[in-house]
Amino acid sequence: MPAQKGRDLLIKLDQTGTGSFLTVAGLRTRTLAFNAATVDVTNTESVGQWRELLAGAGVRNARITGNGIFKNAASDALVRDTFFTGMIRNWQIIVPAMGTVQGPFQISSLDYAGQYNAEVSFDMTLESAGELTFVAA
């Protein structure tokens, strides 16, 4: 994948549950991480006592983190309401030149910070809450 602009990595939240996605505005940094737990099936007959893993058996998850400043009242309110109600909503993560990841996520952390001589900023973390789909660009 050739170099891409970081600002083109977008995080979008389904506003109504009908596929009407709204970009979470004001994000300055965004990260998408995929993880897969392993299931160790090493036993006394494992060749050379090398670890063996059971293919496809571990739990997979994704985590999205982002931080930024408030720019859009609609997306700010939607993120805040989603956190305080504990709702699991569909999100889209658009990775330039790679594709779109979509599925249910829950906001697991929402932090606000501010210095007396700077703007108020926020940090959020989303944890996957079900099956994710990927559509290549």
Image (tube, rainbow, N blue to C red):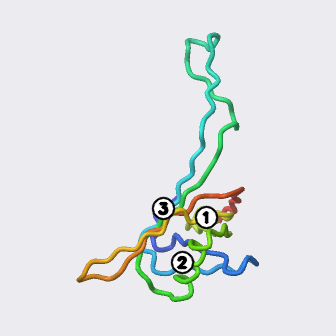
Q: Earlier in the sequence, mark 1 or mark 3?
A: 3
Q: Nearer the viewer, mark 2 or mark 3?
A: 2
Q: Secondary structure at mark 2?
A: helix
Left or right relative to 19: residue 72: left
Q: Which mark is residue 31?
A: 3
Residue extending farthest to the left is 117
Q: Nearer the viewer, mark 1 or mark 3?
A: 1
Please state the horizontal and vertical placement of residue 107, each as a whole percent of the image. 56, 66
Q: What is the three-letter code of the residue carrying label 3?
A: Thr
Q: Residue at x 68, y 64 (%)?
A: 104
Q: Residue at x 52, y 69 (%)?
A: 9
Q: Residue at x 63, y 28 (%)?
A: 53
Q: Residue at x 64, y 47 (%)?
A: 60
Q: CA distance from mark 2 to mark 3?
A: 19 Å
In the picture shown, does residue 44 fall above or below 76? above
Q: Secondary structure at mark 1?
A: strand
Whether label 2 touches label 1, CB < 8 Å? no
Residue 80, quarter of the rendered image: bottom right
Q: What is the three-letter code of the residue carrying label 1?
A: Gln
Disc 2 designates what residue? 80
- The quadrant of the picture occupied by the C terminus is bottom right
Please state the horizontal and vertical placement of residue 132, each as a whole percent of the image. 69, 58
Please state the horizontal and vertical placement of residue 103, each as a whole percent of the image. 68, 63
Residue extending farthest to the bottom is 73
Q: What is the three-letter code of the residue carrying label 2?
A: Arg
Residue extending farthest to the front is 85
Mark 3 burial class by Cα count in 10 Å: few <14, some 14-19, many 20+: some
Whether label 2 touches label 3, CB < 8 Å? no
Q: CA distance from mark 2 to mark 1?
A: 12 Å
Disc 1 designates what residue? 106
